[in-house]
Amino acid sequence: MDITYRPYIDPEFSVLIDRIHPPRVCIDNDTYPDCTLVKVDSANKHGMLLEMVQVLTDLDLVISKSYISSDGGWLMDVFHVTDQQGDKLTDETLIHYIQECICPSRQAAKDSSPPISHQPIFPLHVSSTQHVALEMTGTDRPGLMSEMSAVLAELGCHVTSAVAWTHNGRAASIIYVEDTTTTAAASKSGGGGSAAMDPCRVAQVQAQLENVVEAHHHKDERRSVRMAAPTPGRTHTERRLHQLMAADGDYEACCSCSGGSSELDDFYVHGGCHKGQKKGCDGTHVKIENCKETGYSVITVRSRDRLKLLFDTVCTLTDLQYVVHHAAISSQGSNAFQEYYVKHKDGYTIDSENEKCRVTKCLIAAAERRVSHGLRLDICTRNRTGLLSDVTRVFRENGLSINRAEIGIRGEKATGTFYLKDTTGKNVGPETVDIIRREIGGSIFVHSKSSGVSPEATPSTRSRSGGSSNGGEAAEERSRFSLGNLLWAHLERLSSNFKPIKS
């Protein structure tokens, strides 16, 4: 028998590194007049870039530019951010919260509440460690969420938050629920809060929901229903949604399109799209090359700009087990440009055609999943058990299907954003909106109709160049965008420019 010896690595070693070299987070409001720089200087670990981006996007901050370098076990990352109104970050409570969450040595901050003054923009569906999570994937069919929420209401399960996406004919949702019977019993006994749902009860609810989902699918169609018990360190909700949709294969129908007049048109093309097929296409373009001089795979992504685009891309690369060593991200007008120098976690580059195809499709899917079609409704009403069932029933009875949804609770109020489309393909008329207002009650705000691009794209289109649409300026901006031209010089300046926080 062969005996092999491996070095023992104490699990506290990573914590020791953090103590010896604690992360430095600098919030700089002096360098630029129209944005705040968030600079992070820290020892690196796999997934840390995603954690930093997640902190900023969870606060719905707009990242217009970013420069990332993480070679040699150390990282220096810079993010150009504003709030959704385009203002710099001056709230001391918000600044402190960002610092606390980005520093891994201050783990308690991740369980703390967001700053009170920014509570209205904090996401409604942040992963809950107290509630059971219902995860569902399947074919996107009208009325599916309505019937699922109706079953939950009948079984006495209160929805505390939920998020649902649809893409390429597939649907995925995560719904956090608590058992009203056990919660009431815990309150009477003086325990307070919500009690854990009994495993037998969880199995009963899951079986009922499986019957509902099965009724909406043919025999051989893919579908999945799973109820997960609350656990510490639960995966971030939106990252988990990306994982669910990727596991369900929604990316398989994606292809990188080509056409137009920029130097980014010679993109790696898959799925039957051919160069010149779409003149001036503003879809998602992905190019993958291997750089022999640096030993990296270079992934370039051009797409429509929108909120949380950086999070979606980095999340996908991380889940595909790729490490981002260097990157530059920028926006020009309504377009976003992302360039990543990556290697697989095991050290190899993207060499095979099959792997290039898979990475390309996964990145396109990540960019497209949040692009919402249809009418956006923002709803705020009194929280109660069965509310989601009532709201989705009204949508179903009026011939509407849900394209994307985010629901949550703040105090005694339930708030949610729904992107709706008519099942017949027509626009949602004002008469239908009036019916929804009367039947649901509360406050309902209607946004202008979307033509395939999420209204969330608007705030993140600001760039430091002033947003000119002149073609020459756009070409100049793209030429400056390449890492070969700007990243190294920029990071050299940054390495000597970390200074105390100024607000």
Image (spheres, rainbow, N blue to C red):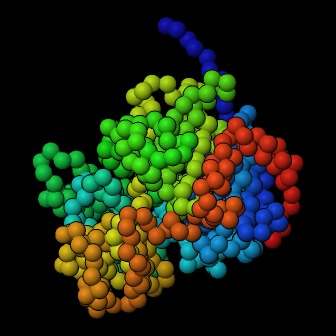
Q: Residue at the spot x=16%, y=59% of the render?
A: 216
User: Where in the figure is residue 284, as x and y percent of width and height?
Assistant: 45, 49
User: Where in the figure is residue 128, as x and y percent of width and height?
Assistant: 47, 64
Q: Residue at the spot x=62%, y=50% of the render?
A: 475
User: Where in the figure is residue 275, as x and y percent of width and height?
Assistant: 41, 39
Q: Quadrant of the C terminus?
A: bottom right
Q: Residue at the spot x=38%, y=63% of the render?
A: 452
Q: Going by the image, does 321 lie left or right of 473?
A: left
Residue 177 seen anywhere in this rendered image of the structure: no
Q: Residue at the spot x=49%, y=7% of the render?
A: 1
Image height of 142 relative to 328, above or below? below
66 vs 9, nearest the viewer = 66
User: Where in the figure is residue 363, as x and y percent of width and height?
Assistant: 46, 45
Q: Going by the image, does 35 lie left or right of 428?
A: right
Q: Going by the image, does 217 lie left or right of 111?
A: left
Residue, far top: 1
Q: Going by the image, does 252 lie left or right of 458?
A: left
Image height of 299 relative to 313, above or below? above
Residue 245 seen anywhere in this rendered image of the structure: yes
Q: Quadrant of residue 184?
A: bottom left
288 vs 307, nearest the viewer = 288
Image height of 83 relative to 171, above or below? below
